[in-house]
Every structure is written in structure tokens, then in C-alpha cells.
Amino acid sequence: MIRMKMAADHSALAELQYHLAKLGQKSAPATSHALKAGANLIYDTWHGFALGGSLTGVESLKNPNDGYARSIRNKQTSDFSHEIYSESIAAERIEDGTQEHDMKTTHPYGKRSRVSKKGIPYLIIPFRWGTPGKEGDTRVGFKNVMPINIYNVMKNTKKIKKSKALNSTHNESNFKGQPQERREYEWGGRLKFGMSDDITPNMEGMTRMTGRAGYFTFRVISANSPSGSWIRPAVAARPVTKAIADNTQRTIEAIVEMGIMEDLEL
């Protein structure tokens, strides 16, 4: 979990609390409101970065993740304190960085793994594609957006019949021999080289699912995949929380000081 705690830490706050106690009052509305505004500023700054925005002090995300942005929470813990946090694994990976990882050593052996007839473990990985010019499909989270010419081919059901997920399932063991319930499909057409000049190797084999499921390509990561494939490169740490604090501290201090002065009627 990545957590940022914000509490009033100002010399005038002690005086405010002293006067509140002396007068028998328990609230300082202006100060409380100022702290809430400061917490909102931290939240908005972090949320904007998660969606691909710039933040002085750290490199912007090349592939923003809307799940990361949705994971950020702003919780008020008292009149004078707030917690802005994320329990997302993505937040920790961005903050702390990641080492290089050979996915062939892990993914083919997981819960959803499969085993070939020759006993080779593998995993099928779906990649979803966004469509061009449609609100919702080009939103953050779609790393792959197909060109308009490819989209025109894919939506032409005379060329590519839609694929359909069936209600029926079957059990199939994973690498560890554990039975896994697998959905069954009625596969339609797939994008092939020659259908358009814009097809790239990453798009080859794309299929269109019925309903709102969208467009997918499927790739296989196997224990026998080439040695240089499926390597996730190391990613340097981004000190996001420090950068947020550095970018918001002066503004928040000014806001809180104004709130304290107002409650003290100075």
C-alpha cells in the first residue's frame, strides 16, 4: 500500500487548539475545511498523474492505467487529518520500481495455466484492442488502439464473422493438475495478412467478440517460448509521493494558515 498522511503541523494550530479548549469548543470549521481542501489537492494531483498527467520531479507514465487512478482514495480520519492512499499493486510498482522479470518462468505455471499434448505448460494471454474515434474505447487503459482501416475490416461481418462465448464450460487441468473450469467458444473469423495493408504482427489473428466484449488478439506464453521473448524489462522507481508533497506543500500550508487565522479571528 502507498499511503500519504496529511495532518495539520503548524505553530498556530497549537494556539488554536488551546483557545478551543479554553472556550469549550470542539470544532474549527475554517481549519477543517482548509485541510480538506489540501487533501483534495493531493488527491487530484496524484489522480492526474495516474491518468498520464505531468508531475514535476517524476517521469510521466507512458502507459497510464485507469485502474491505478481508480485505486486512489481520500479518507478523512479526523477534523485535522486525512489519508490519501492506494492499495493497488501498480502503485507500489511505480513507486518502488521493478526488476527485470522473465515471465516464462512464472506465467505458464500459474492457476490458469494449460498443458500441451507434449506436456509443455503454457498460458493464453488476451490483449484487448480499442477502436478509433469512439468515446470510451480510446480512454486510458487501452494500450492498443487499431487504425481506422483495420477497424473498418473488423466490423465488416461479411469478411470476419463474430466469435461468441458460449454458456457451456468444461474442466481442464492446469500445470499443477488442478481442475479449472474453462469457458467454451464458437470462434468466428480472424484478421489475416492481406486483408489490409495496415496489419502488423501484433494485430494478426484479431477476432471480434459478440456483444460489448470488444476486439481481442490472443498470444501464448510457453515454457518453450524463445529465450529472448516475454521479458519484462526493469523499470526505475518513480518517487511519486515525494513529488506530490513537493508540488503541493506550499499551497497547502498557505490554505491551512488562512483557515487557522480565520478560526482565531485574526
Image (cartoon, rainbow, N blue to C red):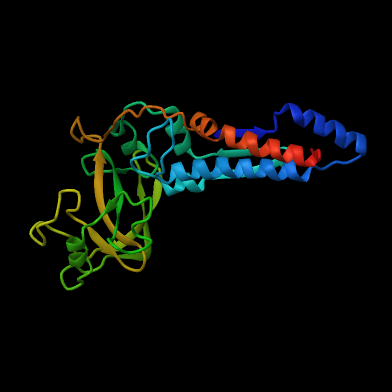
- What percent of the width, then of the height, locates residue 204? 17, 53
Q: Residue at x 81, y 29 (%)?
A: 15
Frontmost residue, 158 versus 17 = 17
Q: Residue at x 11, y 60 (%)?
A: 196
- What percent of the width, then of the height, locates residue 9? 70, 29
Frontmost residue, 251 versus 187 = 251
Which image quadrant for residue 83?
top right
Horizontal side, residue 113 vs residue 230: left or right: right
Q: Residue pushed farthest left? A: 194
Q: If the image is split into quadrants, where does the C terminus sit?
A: top right
Can residue 67 be seen in this snapshot?
yes
Q: Residue pushed farthest bottom? A: 158
Q: Residue at x 21, y 69 (%)?
A: 161
Can residue 78 be seen in this snapshot?
no
Which image quadrant for residue 28?
top right
Q: If the image is split into quadrants, where does the N terminus sit?
A: top right
Horizontal side, residue 181 vs residue 261: left or right: left
Q: Is residue 18 above or below residue 183?
A: above
Q: Residue at x 9, y 57 (%)?
A: 197
Horizontal side, residue 260 vs residue 114: left or right: right
Frontmost residue, 58 versus 229 = 58
- What percent of the width, then of the height, locates residue 81? 70, 37
- What percent of the width, then of the height, locates residue 255? 65, 39
Q: Is residue 246 above or below residue 171?
A: above
Q: How many marks?
A: 0
